[in-house]
Amino acid sequence: MKNKLFKNFIIIFMIIITNLSIINNVFAESDNLIENDTNFYPRKLLSSYKNNEDIDPLINLEVTVDINEIRAFDIIDKKTDPDFYARIFINGEEFRSPIWKNQKYLSNLNWSCTLDVPDDQEFVEIIIQLWDWNIGRDTLCDIALNDNENPNRKDLSIIYSIKTGHWFGDDMIYLPHSWSVDMSGYGRGNGCDDNSIYEDDNDCEIYFDIKQNDYDGDEIPYWTETEMFNTDPTVDDRGRDDDNDNIPIEWENKWGHQFDWEYDELIDQYVIYHTWFYDPFKWDDHQNIDTDNDALNNLEEYLTCQWGSDPFRKDIFVEIDQMNAGSIFEKESVLPDGSKHLIRNAFNRQNIIFHLDDGSWVGETGSESVPFDDVGEKSTWEEVDLLYRKYFLHDNEHNWRRGVFHYGVVIYNAEGASGYCFRSDAFQISRVGMEKKVLSPVCGSRDVVYASAYMHELGHSLGLVFLGGHSRDAYFPWQPLWWKFRPYKSIMNYGYMYGFLHDLVDYSDGSRGKNDFNDWENIDFYNFQSYF
C-alpha cells in the first residue's frame, strides 16, 4: 500500500508541474475544516480548488502580477542590447508589457497587469514569459527552472491561492528537506537553473510579485485573517507582533507559509493543506534561525527584506563608499556601473543574490561619499580603517549593519597593494592602481578591471584564501605558477585578475580537474563575522 501511495504521489506531483490546467482534478472539492484546538501548531486547513462560496465577501477579487526587474545574463542580441517585453497569462487571459528597447538591465519597472478573478475559486493559473523583440521573429528568453519533463521550456507556470496570497509551481518558497525545487528564490526566475550558467541559452533573471486587492491593505487575505489568524479583515495589521519575537505578522505570514499535500484514502485523491511554520501568534527564536546558511538570521533577513532578501535563498549585502575628487585634479574614485553589473551577474547566476548599497536604493542607504584623503600621497591602513569606523560603523561598534553588510570602499591611492582586506568584513580598492591596469594592453576594459578587483577582495571576505595562483609568482606567463594554475579559472587567481588575456569576472566552479578549485562551493558566508 505504501509503495502504491508513493507512486501515486509522484504521478500527481508531475501532473502539477507539467500540466497546470488540470489542477482541478488533483485537489479535492471539500468543505473547510479547521482544527478546533486554537493552540494547534503548525496550523493546517483542508483546501479545495472550488468551494462555491465567496472567499472574500468584502471586495471583488482581483489578482495583479508586478514585473519589477529584468536582467540579461547572456548575449541576447548580437549587435544591440535586448528589446525586452513580458507576456503574462492570468487564467488564460494575455497581457503584454511595453517593449523596453535596447536595455540589458531594467530595474524599478513598476509594470503590472490585473485581472478580475472568480471569488469562489481559490486557485488562479499564471504564466510568466520574457521575450526579446526582433524584426520578423521574437525570441523567448529563458527564466525557467530545470524541468526534466520538458527541458526546452523557458517560462514560469504558477498557481496562486487567493485564500493565502501565496503561490507554488515553478516559483515557490524553497524549503530544505521538502519537495520544492525552486532554488532561485520566491518571486524570482533564473534561466541558469537548468545548469546552463556557462552556455549561451538566452538566460535571464526576472523579479516579480503576485498579489490581490485586500480591504484593509495589509496584504493578508480575508480568508487567512478570518480562518487562520482570527484577526479583523477590516483593520490593517501590519506591524503587529503578538508573539513578541521582534518580527511582525506580515513577514511571518509571507515567509512562514507552505503548501502541503496528503493522500486521502476515503476520497482517493490528494488534498492540499496550508501550513504556517512561522506562526504569528507563537514565539520563534528568529535570532538563531538561518535556514539558508547565508550568515543572516531571520531578524536580519527581516531588516533587509526591504531590499529583496529571501530567508530561504542566499543573499550577500555590501555597502560601498566612494571617495570624492581631490583639489589638485584628482578625479573621484568610484566603482563603474558596468562593474557593478558584472559582479552581480556572477553571483546571481549562482542564486547567491548580490545586493550593493551604492546610494541608489529606495529608502534607507548607508552609502556615502567620503572626503578625499589629502594627508600624504597615499592612504595608509590606519586611514582606511578610520573610514570604516566613521562611515560604516558611524562610531558605533554595535551598528546593526556590522555582521550583515560587508564594506568595500573605493579610495584614490593606497599605500601598499591597490586592493586588500583590512578587516574580515572590509576591503578597499584604489583608483590609481586600477587605472594603471586599465592602460595595460593585456588587461580588460575599465569595467572588467574594477569588477575583478572588487570581487577578488570580497572573495577574501568570504573566506577564499590561501588559493592556488594567489601568488606573486603566478602573475605572468613567464612564471611557472602561472601555467600550473591555468585550470583554476578564477579572479582569485592573479593570472586571471584584471581581465588579463580573458575578460573574466567570476569565481571557479572547480570543473577543470587538477589544480582547479571550486570557489563557489567553498564560500564561507560566516567568515566576515569573525572581526579582526
Image: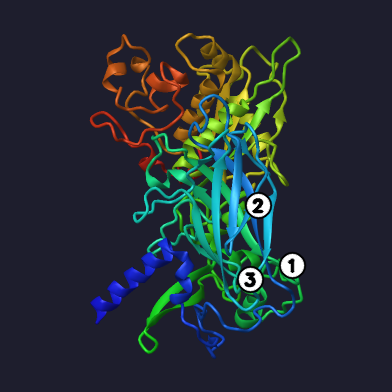
Circles 1 and 2, Cβ within 8 Å, touching? The answer is no
Which mark is nearer the camera, 3 or 1?
Answer: 1
The crowd level at tag 1 (other Cα within 10 Å; few <14, some 14-19, many 20+) is some
- The amino acid type found where label 2 is placed reads Gln
Residue topped by disc 2: 306
From where the camera sits, is residue 445 visible? yes
Mark-to-mark CA distance, 3 and 1: 23 Å
**Which residue is rendered at x = 68% and y = 78% of the image?**
56
Question: Reading the chain from its start, which is encountered first: label 1 or label 2?
Answer: 1
- Quarter of the picture holding the N terminus: bottom left
- Where, by quadrant of the figure, is residue 246 drawn? bottom right
Q: Nearer the viewer, residue 105 or 141?
A: 141
Mark-to-mark CA distance, 1 and 2: 18 Å
Q: Nearer the viewer, residue 309 or 298?
A: 309
- The amino acid type found where label 1 is placed reads Gly
**Which residue is rendered at x = 31% and y = 33% of the image?**
517
Which mark is nearer the camera, 3 or 2?
Answer: 2
- Label number found at residue 244: 3
Question: Reading the chain from its start, which is encountered first: label 3 or label 2?
Answer: 3
